[in-house]
Image (cartoon, grey):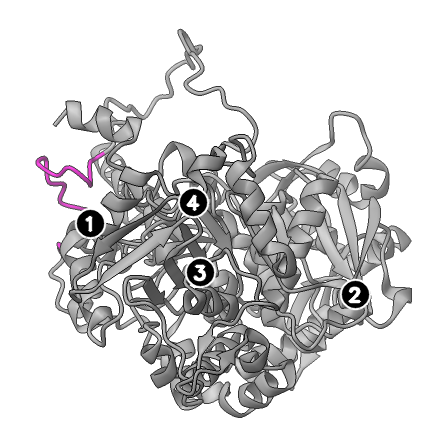
Amino acid sequence: MAATNNPYSSLLKGIEVNGKQFKYFDVTALGEKYDRLPYSVRVLLESCVRNCDNFQVLEKDVQSVLDWEKNQTVEGGVEISFKPARVILQDLTGVPAVVDFAAMRDAVKDLGGDPQKINPICPADLVIDHSVQVDFARSPDALNKNQELEFERNKERFQFLKWGAQAFDNMLIVPPGSGIVHQVNLEYLARVVFTGDLLHPDSVVGTDSHTTMINGLGVVGWGVGGIEAEAVMLGQAISMLIPKVVGYKLIGELNPLVTSTDLVLTITKHLRALGVVGKFVEFFGPGVFALSIADRATVANMCPEFGATVAHFPVDERSLQYLSQTNRAKEKIDIIEAYLRATKQFRDYNNPEQDPIFSEVVELDLSTVVTSVSGPKRPHDRVSVSVMQKDFQDCLTNKIGFKGYGLSPAQLSVSASFSYSDGQTYSITHGSVIIAAITSCTNTSNPSVMLGAGLLAKKAVENGLSVLPYIKTSLSPGSGVVTYYLRESGVVPYLEKLGFDIVGYGCMTCIGNSGPIDDNIANTIEKNELVCCGVLSGNRNFEGRIHPNTRANYLASPLLVIAYALAGTVNIDFEKQPLGTRSDGTPVFLREIWPTRAEIQEVETKHVIPGMFKEVYEKIEQGSPSWQALAIPQGKLYGWDPNSTYIKKPPFFDGMTRELKLAQGVQNARCLLLLGDSVTTDHISPAGSIARNSPAARYLATRG
């Protein structure tokens, strides 16, 4: 990978850090064009220089990236080859990749070769986080019960992946119950700079669209398809077009009462309207420095929702502070800083002289951001909480569409009662909250909003407020660190008192693994055609994704998830209507229990410390007792079970010979799906449960 046949070997330079010598490619020597490049494009250029072999990566690719300013406007685009530094996978999309590697080993053996030579060439990390579901909630044993069911349902998958963890080199598999892939990436896996003998920037492609979250830490990364990810694992370069780069300038400061969630929902609506599909977005300006790395990661996480390829925040002083806070070794942080400064990849957001050239520039004054939610069906349909009640009421009668349900005036007053398992009878209507979930790496990676939710819960309980028992409330932290600092700060008992017990470590409600709701509620909703709601701190709310019975779903900060759970409805004006009453009958308004940014920061500074990250992550590969007890096949070749309905040996290599056959043309190919705008994989193949009255359910039922 280094300089043997590299035409740019003359750019190799030495650097000494803490008495140790390292080498790196001095891309700054390429001249003044380099200084004008966006920081995200500098990462592409360095990769092209370092990997240039005139076979996969050509000198022409290096020149094309260096001439970014001219080439980004070329009609039809200019193609380059890019080799990411690593690959990240989650279990749903990662299993097929590991299956293919296992099948390749069999093929090499059948052809007389050494099967143990088949391993990822590019480092690959797989985090098991998409399997756990909220079957149990609102009880102290919910976490254990959900994890037991997860192992019961996914035993074969877990056995296969555990086998892969010991069978393949250069592949780390993080066991279930550890956290959400993107949060684990941010807190533990990300290198920022690879610090071996040859220093180079970290970059990553992943088989999950929200891989972009890592851009918040200054690592260029985005989601790709499984075949593309496998190719990178096998040492192949990605073919891509030189991107336009939108410079997104942040000025001002956030209001003390708004959150990073409000910021990302604002940016998502703004950039979706601007149109950034296929482009890079790079943040700059003095407002960036005011944002924590967790805030930046929240923004970068929702990059797929605003449509860009990456949402990049170059590394700065705050990035180094975050690496220290998350227990990265000081020795490595010193190397990272020295290398990035030497190659002009280290950013001072307060220095406009460092601002590169952008394809176009847009600006946001952070002080204009207000408390917001997004919905009821799309993540970029932001609504200010101040007008939420009217917006929801308008949605009920608007014609059927992204902002409408087409109800007649007569249907608006429909309400219905049901008996619940506690023996009580409850009434629900349009706007009633059925699911309230603090979930998703978008927000669970951010201590400010998680601790903010805890402080709000504490004040709510102290003022005598509670959540109706039929609302399915849940808390799924993105890593064990979150549980650690929530417990240390003393807010867990208050969250539990409101029904927000910890239910598991994974995406859960955000990907539709919200689990079942009470049959009486489901039947009441269906029979009366009610527009009931889910409120979640996730990143997607497409119809049918969260739960079949929540026709309206709103993305919100963890604090607002609790607020709407307390209200029991989204059909509320928080300024004029109270959340409930105290024991003496006086009303409690949301503004009375909402914590300020200063309150939250005081708790965060005290309780989010490096020791937590050290304790949680130094044993992450061990897994739970259930994982440790999981029996796995031995050996470097997988023992395929012909009766398996899940892990099948693929037929790609059947009949393969050492001699290449002539390539055959594609015949009788036809389009499987031709889809309109805003139709996503969420609509085509939901990861969550399938509604009993849906066409998909009817189709499956007819086939047993």
The first of marks 4 and 3 along the sequence is 4
Residue 481: give x, y in percent of width and height. Answer: 41, 78
* Mark 3 vs mark 1, CA separation in Å: 26 Å
Say which of 204 and 488 sits in front. Answer: 488
Could you tell whether 285 is left or right of 657 in the image?
right
Could you tell whether 549 is left or right of 232 in the image?
left
Magenta span contains residue 647: yes
Give, as a three-letter code, the residue at label 2. Lys
Q: Alpha-carbon neighbours of circle 1 within 10 Å: few (<14), some, or many (≥20)?
A: few
Q: Nearer the viewer, mark 3 or mark 2?
A: 3
Segment tinted magenta in the rendering:
633-649
| Residue 344: numbered disc | 2
Query: In the rendered view, would you say 684 is above or below 433?
Result: above
Q: Which residue is mark 3?
A: 440
Residue 423: give x, y in percent of width and height. Answer: 15, 65
| Residue 413: numbered disc | 4
Magenta span contains residue 596: no
Element assignment for label 1: helix
Q: Which residue is mark 1?
A: 519
Residue 47 seen in the current view:
no
